[in-house]
Image (tube, grey):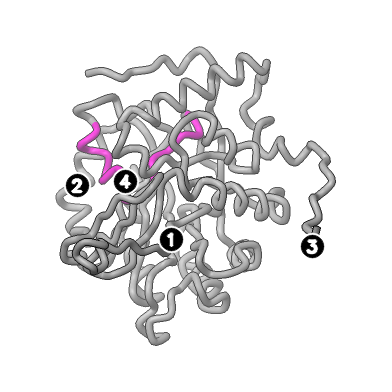
Amino acid sequence: MFGEVKTDSCDLSITLFGITFKNPVWVASGTFGYGLEAREIYDVSLLGAVVTKGISLKPREGNPPERIAETPCGMLNSIGLQNPGVEGFLKKIYPHIEKIDTHFIANIFGETEEEYVEVCMALEDARKIVAYELNVSCPNVKKGGMLFGHDAVVLGRLVESVKAKVKKPVLVKLSPNAGNVVEFAKVCADAGADGLVLINTLLGMKIDVKAQKPDLSTFTGGLSGPAILPIAVRMVWEVFSELGDKLPIIGVGGIHDTDSALEHILAGASAVQIGTANFSDPLCPLKVIKGIQDYMQNMKEKNFKSLVGKAHGIKLQPYLFQQGP
């Protein structure tokens, strides 16, 4: 075993939506499996939380290859939400994660509002699952394929339906492709969401110029990695500016080291999720935990919460773009 870090040098524990987490550094859905493979590299219980790979009502095989493509400062993926379904998850995977001493958050998706509710209800008695993260970047078959997160009315109704049936906290992972992220964040807040996750991947494409065809079998895919960091930080900032006192924001997108995690936090994120960086540096989450501790000590910050949104306290005159010389 290697890559262990001491987490007692600085208290990073946080309490969000009634749950206390060891620290604010989590791993993002789809980049860490269900937390099992990483046990061969380090003690997964050192993480603040593990967000599972997406779980649906029925098993999904995902998209055919090719479904991953490297891009400058990032990657495109079109995995297609491959997973064993909620029943398969509970039977084959859940017994193993029960042995890991940290919280798990289930990333949930469906093709209908009813499927989201059914998956969450199936996990209500799973003690290790402490919250749900709704992936709303999925097509609603009842609405002709419109993504749940691209229709404010449908999104609000989805959040209300899930909240009406479950006891555990409900987080909503918003799409950066839907338009004004603040408006969609407000819809979620009004519908009773317990937290927001910003952001999901951006829609992108890569073409093989030698083969003269798209790299991905689905043509387009989700762009992630350091390339999207400025966009994610901007959206965290905007939503925190409007809703920072109403519900916590979990920052995700482009985080690959301590500074990029701190950008999210100073912009308004109460916790962060590390995604694509897990592929290039599996120890990245542990390095970020240690890095935040060191930063707090160097800056003489005693309370992690005091860092959240701290950049908003600096009053700057907005730069006005002008046309012409």
Residue at screen point 35% across, 82% down: 141
**Does residue 249 appear left or right of residue 79 in this picture?**
right
Residue 37 magenta-highlighted = yes
Camera sees residue 81: no
Q: Nearer the viewer, mark 1 or mark 2?
A: 1
Pointer 4 or 1: first along the chain: 4
For disc 2, the marked residue is 93
Q: Position of residue 220 (x, y in %)?
A: 33, 67
For disc 3, the marked residue is 324
Spatial separation of the CA atoms under disc 3 and disc 1 = 45 Å
Label 2 sits on what residue type? Answer: Ile
Q: Position of residue 16 (x, y in %)?
A: 56, 41
User: Measured along the vertical axis of the image, is residue 208 above or below residue 311?
Assistant: below
Q: Nearer the viewer, mark 4 or mark 2?
A: 4
**Which span of residues is magenta-colored?**
23-38
Label 4 sits on what residue type? Answer: Thr
Q: Nearer the viewer, mark 3 or mark 1?
A: 3
Quarter location, residue 143: bottom left
For disc 1, the marked residue is 134
Q: Quadrant of the C terminus?
A: bottom right
Residue 31: image tag: 4
Q: Position of residue 148 (x, y in %)?
A: 45, 73
Marks 2,3: beta carbons within 8 A: no
